[in-house]
Image (cartoon, helix red, strand yellow):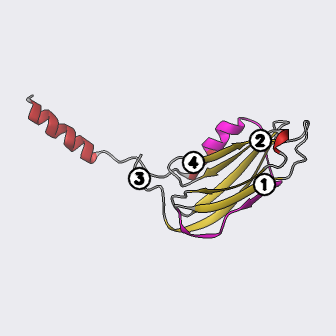
Amino acid sequence: MNQRRIFITSLTALSLSPWQSASATPSEAMRAMQRIVGNRPINTGRIYFDLPPLVENGNLVAIKFAVQSPMTQNDYVKVIHVIAEANPLPNVVSCYFTPLSGKAEVSTRIRLADSQKVWALAQMSDDSFWRTSVDTVVTLSACTEMI
């Protein structure tokens, strides 16, 4: 075959192939949590998670999360993960703490690709896990670039 036919055949094959989705699926978000947790059980509660139920612009979403903990040497929050089930990459942010942190509380801004459920997953010093979730509606999506 000459180079032109190879090129045209390649373009045709590329045009017929399905594009990779620009957003994760709920099952991908669950797999992301499973990779963090392993086989350990996940408890509900103990986490305060503030995310507006309606977001006008997904490019800049203010969130605040905190975990009830005495933050002592024997009982503290190790890490809090935020997982968004419709973002291209479900792991949005991970925040690490020590007993010297004083409080396990974070305020930040994230991007959300679409209306979705967002999870906060906390790992404690005894390796127990706690989670909570918030549903939010995004009117102007972010993260729309193909990956």
Number of callouts: 4
Residue for badge 1: 66
What residue type is disc 2 on? Phe
Q: Position of residue 45 (x, y in %)?
A: 82, 55
Q: Could you say which quadrant of the image residue 5 lies in? A: top left
Residue that label 3 marks = 145
| Magenta span | 31-58
Q: From the viewer's perspective, is residue 132 above or below residue 122?
A: below
First in sequence, mark 2 or 1: give its number. 1
Camera-side mark, 2 or 3: 2
Residue shown at 25% from the left, 47% from the top: 15
In the rendered structure, which disc, 4 or 2, sits on the residue that comes first in sequence?
Answer: 4
**4 vs 3, front mark:** 3
What's the residue type where badge 3 is placed?
Glu
Which residue is drawn at the image coordinates 91% and 36% (left, top)? 74
Left or right side of 131 for 33: left
Residue 78 lies in quadrant: top right
Task: Identify the disc placed on residue 97.
Answer: 2
Q: For the residue marked with disc 4, what is the amino acid?
A: Pro
Residue 57 among those drawn in magenta: yes
Ranked by sequence position, the earlier of labels 1 and 3 is 1
Instruction: Say what secondary structure mark 2 lies in.
Output: loop
Closest to the camera, between mark 1 and mark 4, is 1
Residue at 56% from the left image edge and 61% from the top image edge: 60
Q: Which mark is residue 90?
A: 4
